[in-house]
Image: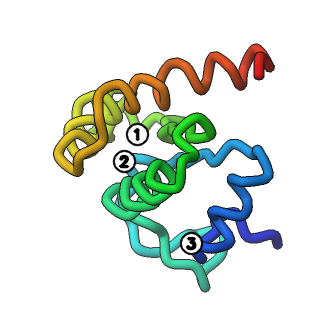
Amino acid sequence: MALRTVFDKCELAEFAALGSYCEYDMFGIETSVYSCNLNVDMPSDAQRIQNIQFLIDQGFEDKIVIAHDVHTKHRLMKYGGHGYSHILINVVPQMLNRGISQATIDRILIENPKKWLTMKM
């Protein structure tokens, strides 16, 4: 099974330098084990934000996109999950608290997905 997460920061910067988008998903899933590969520790939201900050510091803010996985009923707020608003309610304030500017957050949440989804480089 292929590894879906780059843990080494040098490899992450090298990957981003290729022009690839770095997508951080699973925001709101705060479990310590990645069920698809028990040898991988699942990153927390805080660790995802730290990696995003690293990429921003390296000059790759235009190659970052983020998401959460609300793909099952129990992830909806109605059923006790983090819901579709988790990034806006919880993650964005943490990003601001960590010194990521609103302009950079807007690029990550709006401009980067728009470029990626329309293939406008």
Up the image or down, 9 lies above or below 120; here it is below
The Cα–Cα distance between marks 3 and 1, rounded to whole angstroms, is 30 Å
| Residue that protrudes farthest toward the bottom in the picture | 39
What residue is drawn where x is 23% and y is 31%? 89
Badges 1 and 2: C-beta atoms under 8 Å apart?
A: yes
Label 3 or label 2, whichever lies nearer to me, is: 3
The residue under label 3 is 9
Name the quadrant containing residue 7: bottom right
- Residue 34: percent from left, percent from top: 55, 70
Under circle 3, the secondary element is helix
User: In terms of depth relative to the viewer, which is nearer, 108 or 74?
Assistant: 108
Label 1 or label 2, whichever lies nearer to me, is: 2
User: What number is the disc on residue 28?
Assistant: 2
Please, what is the three-letter code of the amino acid marked with disc 2?
Gly
Q: Of callouts 3 and 1, which one flags the residue occurring earlier in the amino acid sequence?
A: 3
The residue under label 1 is 75
User: What number is the disc on residue 23?
Assistant: none
Task: Tell whether 4 sits left or right of 47.
Answer: right
Please, what is the three-letter code of the amino acid marked with disc 1?
Arg
